Amino acid sequence: MRHLFLLFAALPLFAQTQIQTTIDPTRAASVLRIAIPAPEVTGTTFDAINEPLFKPLTRDISMSGIFAIAPLPPNVPITTEVLQRINAQLLLKLSVHTEGEDFVVEARLSDTTGQPQFGKRYRGPAAALTRLAHLLASDLVRTLNGKPGPFQSQIGFASDRDGHWEIWLMDWDGGNQHAITHHGALSILPSWSPDGERMVYTSFARGTSDMYIINRRGGGRIRVATGLNLNTSATFSPVSNDIAFVGSINGNPDIYVIKDDGSNRRRLTNSPTIESTPEWSPSGRQISFTSGRSGTPQIYVMDAEGTNVRRISFDGDWNDDATWSPDGEQIAYTSRVSGRFQIRVANLSTGESRILAGEGSNEQPTWSPDGKWIAFQSNRSGKWQIYRMRIDGTDIEQLTFNGENKDPDWSKKSE
Amino acid sequence: MRNTSRAFAWTLCVVVLGLFAMACPKKPKVETHPAVVDTTPPPTVTIPPNNPPVDTKVENKDFVQEKPIVQETLPADIEELNRYVQAHGYIQDAFFGYDESQLSADAQAALTGSANWLKGDGKGYNLLVEGHCDERGTEQYNLALGDKRANIAKEYLATLGVDASRIRTVSYGEERPFDPGHDEAAWAKNRRAHLVLVGK
């Protein structure tokens, strides 16, 4: 597995200035029609690169919300006339050749008159072709609207497929699923560091629930000694090396913050009721959490120092798992409606909320770094599996299929 | 070890019944007993009220001298031991209401019985109290709820005279249901403080 993480070089084909585009970025809100002919291949075959490269690339592009793929007629030379006939506004030409063990992928994006919009050369071993596809797709989106797509982000989750619950990672589209912990003991609730290099999680490896940090390659594992019980729901601050978590003394779970080296522990809540599930706002200035202080579990927000606590959920008799949209304007959480859990998205300034998802119980929402998708867990199939949907609730897709899978946490970084 | 603890239990009975004058082979220890009794809440008086003092005396003597009849051999294997003490009701789990972490009368009775064994024949064992929840809540909140349940059971055992330093807690939330079912019968079994002996 380790070779998957080998770096591949991405070299500009053209000078940087040529990447600027004649397409008005404000138009990226509307969908651009893009024609993508099959790559020209040298030293390899189309079949060899179709699954690892071409399919994930075209899938990313088609799901970007920016491009729509214009189907090309078969066996026809691509001319300006052909492109106009299929209403294409852009043409993405790909060529792939091999240099030793490496694959070199060249991508050229032009408008229908042949005017170049984007050009880049990517290089990597066969095992890196899918990552290369996601990088290229992300580059294309950034070229058009200034911000990268979510295609390089990853989703951490817990899976019991190998007999024990362990921490796993997958690409945004469900590809490349692999375990990063091997405790042989209940290990759950992973949460990404803001730089996407580490995860903090809870494991019962010592027979008690402890906080651990591991890097995304599965190395460098440390246990963070908090001096408290429970050590669940740990989550990195987006702006410092603080970790918020649920700690307990004598059966009183409250929200605490501790540095990632186990120093400087601070208590943020001090209530005899249950406090759980802290989550930082993107600015790091506020923390949402769940509290039973009103009699049922409800969502509250406080300043990062533990002051200025206010309740933000009022619908439903059990709310938990609050998580902030990347722009900090919305909070998604798990909300019980008519006895079943659903994903609720609330606008913090208006207080209005809407229900997403549907069948079964749906829990633990997590936002994509571009704020356009939410991943969550659902038992609609009879087992807990991880799904992904657009934030309007459409395009629901199941991402996991082996064993049971839960606790999704989407990386906060696009690149 | 068990002999002396059994003797100790019997001596306690004697004290509770107010028979201080009864012949007790270890006189110096008698002085410490009233303090132990003071910390024991009323429900721990489980001796049948019609138990004749004379019989007590005789049995006590027999026990100390001959170690017969009531002597039982506990399994050495810790997992077997846990099955054994649960099957015989020496150790009983405490069950909770939905989203509750308060002890019901039944839960208190279960813990009282467990405390008596832990102070008697089980005196040498350390205890793990696992907090469990049913599946109807959310995972993260339930981990915290399980922690509360485990600790409330631990505290109650401590007030009944079980040394708190012998008791560790852990919360499994809804991660390890006893009954995988999805109905109230299963849920009721899964809301518990589960008592586990973890060696001496």
Image (tube, rainbow, N blue to C red):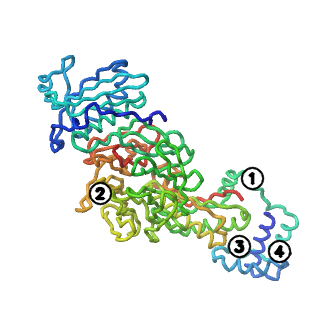
Of residues A311 and A38, which is closer to you in this image? A38
* Chain identity of mark 2: A
Q: Is B50 left or right of A411, judged from the image as shown?
A: right
Residue located beneath label 4 in the image:
B57
Residue located beneath label 3 in the image:
B48
Q: Is A403 left or right of A11, judged from the image as shown?
A: right
Amino acid carrying mark 1 in the image: Ala
Residue A336 visible somewhere in the drawing: no
Q: Nearer the viewer, mark 4 or mark 1?
A: 1
Instruction: Give the residue displayed 34% in from the left and 25% down from the top.
Output: A50
Q: Are marks 3 and 4 in contact (CB under 8 Å)?
A: no
Of residues B152 and A4, which is closer to you in this image? A4
Amino acid carrying mark 2 in the image: Gly
Q: Nearer the viewer, mark 4 or mark 2?
A: 2
Estimate the spatial distance between the alpha carbons at disc 3 and disc 2, rounded to whole Å. Answer: 66 Å
Q: Which of the numbered marks, if any, corresponds to residue B76?
A: 1
Residue A362 pos. (x, y %): 36, 49
Mark with earlier residue (3, 4): 3
Residue A103 pos. (x, y %): 38, 25
Q: Is B78 left or right of B24, judged from the image as shown?
A: left
* Chain identity of mark 3: B
